[in-house]
Amino acid sequence: MWLLGILGLAAFYRFFRLTALPPGLNPDEAMNGNDALASLASGHFAVFYPENYGREGLFIWIVGLSLKLFGTSVGALRLPSAVIGTLTIAAIYLLASELHGRRVAILGSLLTAVSFWHVTFSRMSLRAILVPLVMSLAFGILLRGLRTRRASAVILAGALFGLGAYTYVAFRAAFLLLAGALLLVPRESWSAAGGTRSRVPPSARGWRLAGALLAAAGMVALPLVAYSLRHPDEFGSRMRRVSVMAAEDPPEALWRSTVLTAKMFFVRGDDNPRHSHRKAPVLPLAVSPFFGLGLALAVKRTVAPRRGGREDPASLLGDRRGAVFLLSWMVIMALPVVLTGRGVPHALRSIGMLPAVFILAASGVVAVAQAAGRIHRGAAVAVTVCVAGAAAVQGYRAYFVDWGRDPLVREVFRQDLVEKAGYLKTLSPASRAYVIANGRGLPVPHPDGLPMPAQTLLFLLHDDCARPAPAIACPTFVRPEALESLEVDPLRPNVFVLLKDDAPEAAWLSRRFPQGVWRRPGDAVVYSWPR
């Protein structure tokens, strides 16, 4: 019952005004949508899409299904992330219940449900949102399968780990965590889950089951592994681009990344307005002290475990090993951001840390509530309700009010390009429309294609311009270097749109075609004639 209520709350935070917030459409989102549309048209869904520094294919496949079912729209593009984000709450509940029991599971899933950090990525069409879901689900099923002695669940967990390879580059670190988890699980649990009727010795049954898990992971991941061996440059381009080893002083860059990553929970968050509001920490004030406490308690349990064994008899790992597992999760899943020398701290690259962060925060709340309960019977409930309520209010305000109304958010999500696409859709085919592909952005396709911001227009105009006889003036994209040789029909209405308005190309248009006039429909800026 508690989980259903939390899932309902999570769904509200992720689906409420989904088509309007974030405003606009970020080019990275549009790139995923355009690749999904191309895959639908060709029937070929790749395991890896090399453009935009390379992207694993699973999220694009899911986006393709959404676009196929619901049409080409911003809502259909972001719908998979909202669904995945909501399902992640249930997965974190499963994982936390296996590690620390029901109370921590309820609080951990609730704090995640209202977290600005997770809500933000649950409402934009980026593949990283898959990482917390697949990691929580895979480890939760693994621990439950071993605890309940179900070999089939253990093998399913292995398949999920293999599927995780198709999510986001940060998931590659999860295989290190898996190796550590295999060692942390008590040997007798492996033997018991491997079966009791077999004549094979118990130790051999455990090794056989662990081998089956790894084999399932390897079989599922095999097509992507084969691709990486055939195309090593494409597969590793994103990591090489941002690695600390590319810095002038790698040790200093590594130390700086580590410090900034640690600070992002308490002091200063991501600089990118797409991920954060004015560099705010990823945890709100209502949660960060309890995360710090949960972290300290985990360290204490690691170095000085309680006498008398496990904290929760239902937990497979127990008190000390569970703490080691969560601390290892924090350290290992911090590597994708710590080992990068650019854009640190980075809320997106560190998303693999998220499940462990909120489970530790929940354990901190439970510890305080238990201490308060020893003073007064109702104090435990009061502490829990106050923390959960404050987290929900702060999460809502941070996303829907502060971040949602920030002009920088409209800018980074290219609301201006959405307005321009809307204006172009009002033009009849008798008009000639041109998009000057100026401004910064990675060329797509690389190295001679249009800059990344063009992806937003291409996605929004796709259905109208893919028809045999378009009912709108589908634009011609013109590179800045080709402007001098551009010939226009003086007898037809002409409209020019720039990817970047404040640029030399704007002045060139005014000089070259003085008969035109600048118009501002909404956030868009267009140059057209006749007047």
Image (tube, rainbow, N blue to C red):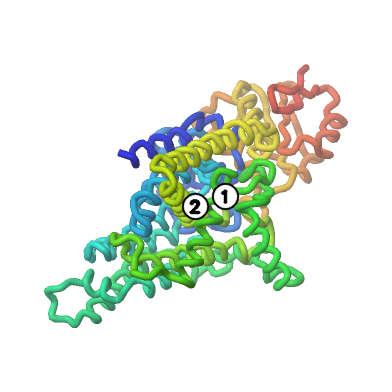
Quadrant in which residue 258 is drawn: bottom right
Question: Which residue is at a point 34% across and 71% down the rendered structure image?
Answer: 185
Quadrant in which residue 416 is drawn: top right
Percent across and percent down for residue 86 are: 41, 42
- Amino acid bearing label 2: Ala
Q: From the viewer's perspective, is 104 left or right of 423? A: left
Depth check: give the residue in front, 526 or 202. 202
Q: Which mark is residue 97?
A: none
Q: Is residue 122 positioned above or below 294 on the image?
A: above
Dot 1 surroundings within 10 Å: few (below 14), some, or many (20 or more)? many
Percent across and percent down for residue 241 are: 65, 63
Percent across and percent down for residue 1 are: 30, 38
Quarter of the picture containing the C terminus is top right
The answer to whether mark 2 and mark 1 are in CB contact below 8 A is yes
Q: Which mark is residue 361?
A: 2
Marks 2 and 1, the one that precedes in the sequence: 1
Disc 2 and disc 1: Cα gap in Å? 7 Å
Q: Residue furthest right?
A: 511
- The residue beneath circle 1 is 288
- Amino acid bearing label 1: Ser
Q: Is residue 1 positioned above or below 373 on the image?
A: above
Question: Which residue is at a point 87% across and 31% down the rendered structure image?
Answer: 511
Q: From the viewer's perspective, is 139 left or right of 38? A: left
Depth check: give the residue in front, 111 or 158. 111
Depth check: give the residue in front, 114 or 289. 289
Q: Is residue 299 visible?
A: yes
